[in-house]
Amino acid sequence: MDSPLLDYCRKNPRPYTYFAIGSAPHTSVGDLTPKWDQIVPVFLREVTMPTRAIHYDPWFKLPWLMEYFKDAEFSEFANGWRFVDGNLEVILFPTEFKHYGQYSDPQDDWIVEDLVAQSLEQKTLFVLQEYTGQEVQMWFRRLYEATSNKPMFRSKILFDMTYGDDAGCMTDLTKYRPYYTRRGDFINLTLLTGDEMQKNIGLNPDIDAHILKFYRSKCIELVEFHIVNYRRRVKGESVLNKCAWYGENAHPAEIMDVLHGKFSELAPVLQRLGFLTPYKLSELEGLLTKYYLIDMYEWAPTFKRMLG
């Protein structure tokens, strides 16, 4: 499909593109603070290379934008407007960005997907932020799985700079920003494996907080998966959650041994992050080895409470 925007971007590449959906402000220019400025957010102002911001929102009003960009060069662009201020170029469309529907009807997602392809071809950075509350991680993951160059995709393409923590219309833009490697590429936390995440421990306290959240969740998932099987086997029923580590009629003790072993694989990471103290580890180890002393319906809540 033809698109003046895509043609223009292809002929005039920039090293860094920020694509925002639903980013129009609902306050006066004078009352807009860095915390809520989604047009040129704090993280984009920090980028030293030439940047391009692309916005879609039916609530954009030209008089408001003229006041916001009072020192910028203005021109009309297709069905929208273009402002240039030094190394920053901003293109805004006062229209709704529509995602694929229930039956995958062609909407506007193809525009982003073409820009992603351009960035991969040109080896430039592209970050998308959705401010409407629309979930984008499944879309992001689908594009990642479809690409033939996954290392390049992970280093150059980022959907949601909060990494799943606070994407929406009220994202605090003084708090969140993309994470970068020493080479200036993205650290794409939501696409990293657990082992890859561990290599980034200690680079940044915010990154550590994300990794901790990930591994704590893995611990909870581990407990919830196996404890159901343990309770069913105690009652003489076959396991509910099948796995490769034990059979459907495994002894309850065998199931808890597996749970203990799997937790022991995660524990060193939680210790490196400073979350799992020697005392807390000792308490959890006691719970894992003396599980039979606790009511089986109270075991999981007790473990989660001790884990913190």
Image (tube, rainbow, N blue to C red):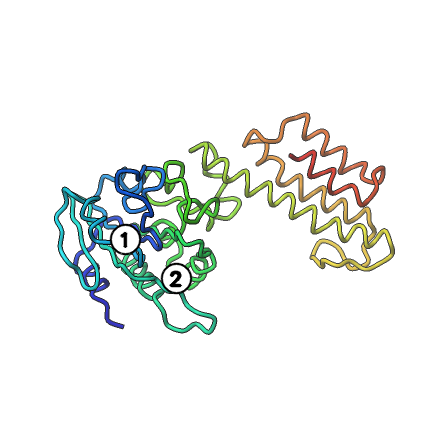
The residue lying toward the viewer, choosing from 22 and 253, is 22
> Helix, strand or loop at disc 2?
loop
Q: CA distance from mark 1 to mark 2?
A: 14 Å
At 27% from the left and 73% from the top, the residue drawn is 1
Whether 131 is drawn above or below 8: the answer is above
**Image marks 1 and 2: residues in contact by CB distance under 8 Å:** no
Q: Position of residue 279 (x, y in %)?
A: 68, 25
The residue lying toward the viewer, choosing from 18 and 253, is 18
Q: Which mark is residue 147?
A: 2
> Quarter-wise, where is residue 115 in the image?
bottom left
Tell me the crowding category of disc 1: few under 14, some 14 to 19, or many 20 or more residues within 10 angstroms, Cα based: some
Q: Position of residue 64 (x, y in %)?
A: 23, 48
Identify residue type, mark 2.
Thr
Identify residue type, mark 1.
Lys
Whether 115 is drawn above or below 52: the answer is below
> Quarter-wise, where is residue 233 in the image?
bottom right
**Left or right: residue 45 compared with residue 163:** left
Tell me the crowding category of disc 2: few under 14, some 14 to 19, or many 20 or more residues within 10 angstroms, Cα based: few
**Left or right: residue 244 compared with residue 204:** right
Q: Which residue is mark 1?
A: 123
At 59% from the left and 35% from the top, the residue drawn is 270
